[in-house]
Image (cartoon, rainbow, N blue to C red):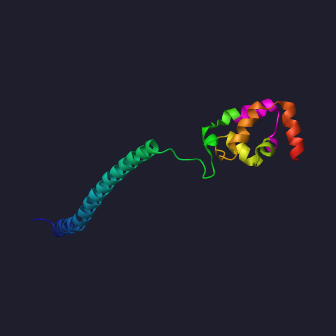
Amino acid sequence: MPNIGSIFKSEISRLARKELRGAVGGLKKAANSHRSEIAALKRRIQTLEQQLRRLSKDRAGAAPVAADDESDGAATALRFSAKGLASQRKRLGLSAHEVGLLVGASSQSVYNWEQAKARPRARHMPAISALRTLGKKEAQRLISERR
């Protein structure tokens, strides 16, 4: 004859498993619905990103964006290179503050331009391109005039 303790234990285990199945079933359904919602959102993000890329390509090809509202035709033709500005500054033996005086900007702006953290505005571009034609003596003369 089986022991009453073992029968009682097996019955409690059976009831516990039955209760767990009921509680876990709802959680499984919720997890599955969340997974499907996440997958749908990922698909939507992917299509939106594709549309954004297409629109940005179309926009870039249709009309080039002007650097500033006040820019004229000559300023848009000028190119800027961070390395080029740094080498011009070195060639002339000038500090960033002195280049800022010549260009009409702050020394921090010159540093940011050289490190490619920022790009100069269109109004600064003619002065930056004029640095290429300056010699050391002429640059020093211009700086002494502007101080």
At 22% from the left and 68% from the top, the residue drawn is 16
Residue visible at 17% across and 68% down? 11
User: Where in the figure is residue 12, as x and y percent of width and height?
Assistant: 20, 69
Quarter of the rendering containing residue 124: top right
Look at the image and give the residue range highlighted in magenta: 85-98
Closest to the observer, 17 or 39 = 39
Say whether residue 141 is left or right of residue 81.
right
Q: Position of residue 90 (x, y in %)?
A: 78, 32
8 drawn magenta: no
Taking the spot 81% from the left edge, 45% from the top edge, the residue there is: 101
The stretch drawn in magenta includes residue 89: yes
* Residue 52 placement (x, y as % from top left): 40, 50
Picture coordinates of residue 56, whole percent (x, y): 43, 47
**What is the magenta segment's predominant secondary structure?**
helix
Q: Is residue 94 above or below residue 53?
A: above
Residue 131 lies left or right of residue 47; in this view the side is right
- Along the horizontal axis of the image, is 110 left or right of 136? left
Quadrant location of the N terminus in the rendered image: bottom left
